[in-house]
Image (spheres, rainbow, N blue to C red):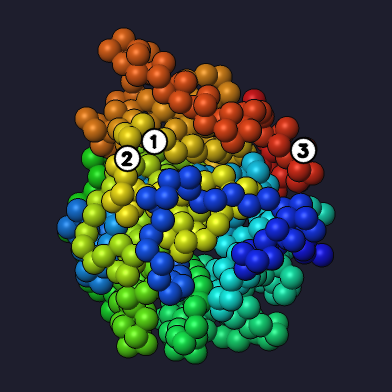
Amino acid sequence: MKKISRNYVLPVVSSALLLLTTGFALVEKSKDASVHLPKKAKPNIVIIMADQWNAQSLGYAGNKDVKTPNLDKLAARSVVFSTAVSVMPVCSPARASLLTGQYPLTHGVFYNDRPLKNEALTLAEIYKSQGYATGFIGKWHVNGHSSHEAQFAARNRTVPKDRRQGFDYWKAREVTHDYNQSFYFDENDVRHEWPGYDVFPQTDSAIGFIDQNKSKPFLLFLSWGPPHDPYATAPEEYRKLYNPENLTLRPNVPDSLKTKARKDLAGYYAHCTALDKAAGDLLEALKKAGVAENTIVVFTSDHGDMLYSQGKIRKQKPWDESILVPLLIHYPAGLGDKKRELSLPFSNIDILPTLLGLSNMQIPKSVEGTDYTAIISGKKKPSGEEAALIQVPVPFHENNFLNGGKEYRAVRTKQFTYVRDLKGPWLLYDNAKDPYQLQNLIGNAAYADTQTKLETVLQTKLAEAKDDFLTADAYMSKWKYRYDGKDSLRVQ
């Protein structure tokens, strides 16, 4: 059963009754009245999320190889975050954190394919209670399976209505990375096939949702599977755009991996360009529907992809290719139509509270992220001391212990990355001087004060998150989770 407190946002006249009957407390989004935006019609919300798209692989981010003209044009009219961080750089945890505004160790999805609890208060439930139509299309990946079931048992099953976390319009599948033979389930659990490369019909479905709901406020979450591997499966017309031999690799890719890296990068970029085309179609649809001005568009990803930087692949790693994601926020009616670049570290747990702030809505106490409305709107400047916490309580699957994975916590500031594992300080990078993170400064006398300060910052963030930084086994036991496959095995 869903808790009654999930529908907590009621008109002001009934808020006192709500507090008495549910015990669910509300907090104002800010004590500073200057933070509040001018009263406007309720803004529509469109969240476009790609899977495993790193922050470095976009034209507007300075990448001269990848072709992303539509997103580049959007960036030229948006708030652009150069240091957007994935709180736990892997699929299910990052997605659950965006939906709830909570750390993984709070909502409990710190391991892939584990269920986000029904009791969680989520983005869609909050907006739905304010009269919004809600729609979700694409990859879900927070329903999970029961601990007694086999690994990946739920990936091809329907997501029950009471597990859709407030989304009513529903064209979703738990997980697939077969983008050309993809299916989904609708609101009534009927299975349908996405014709061709699923990104395009998914986007068409999103456009249909916009057209159906343009006369009332709506929340739409469009969740694409690419550019997550397999890399070589984008439509041929996009794969033809990239010759591996002509691609520039990051300086932190080892020589021994450069041939493989270029091949995979060509496929990765092909996916990115196909997604960019879909993004352009969606943005044009908002204009045609007459709702672009009063729609908050968020473009982001759940986590990045190492793509052989540091000799590593995929995600869960503490380096920028894994933890940094693209993030654009576009809202002409509230933020104007000019580009503003922000380098403060903005976590995906900050997306929900910031959307509520931009919507002039209250923020529940369950939310642990920060509302950055004042900074985004230009009413307040960043302090320069902001820091985002990264948690990897349990390394798993590709990053399991046998593959070199380990528990760690990190903070990413505007300038520095500082990482601890269970043994102590592990990594320290000055990203301003060393953007490819080639020199680990742990123990470097010239950075001793910096390391001490960052240790204090990390401990403060851990305390705020109520994170005791225990072993993986402790968390798996606490939440009664079972390790998949060989994930529990350590190198002897």
Q: Are marks 2 and 3 in contact (CB under 8 Å)?
A: no
Give the vertical position of 239 relative to 265 (above or below).
below
Is 78 displayed left or right of 355 in the figure?
A: left
Horizontal and vertical percent for residue 18? 73, 60
Q: Which residue is mark 3?
A: 478
Disc 1 or 3, which lies upstream in sequence?
1
2 or 3: mark nearer the eye: 2
Give the vertical position of 427 relative to 333 (above or below).
above
Q: Which residue is mark 2?
A: 382
Is 21 displayed left or right of 356 in the figure?
A: right
Q: Amino acid at mark 1?
A: Glu
Horizontal and vertical percent for residue 364? 61, 53
- Label 2, label 3: how many angstroms apart (C-alpha)? 37 Å
Horizontal and vertical percent for residue 149? 79, 58
Q: Amino acid at mark 2?
A: Pro
Q: Is residue 179 visible?
A: no
Q: Nearer the viewer, residue 392 or 4?
A: 4
Q: Quadrant of the C terminus?
A: top right
Q: Which residue is mark 1?
A: 386
> Which quadrant holds residue 159?
bottom right
Horizontal and vertical percent for residue 125? 63, 66
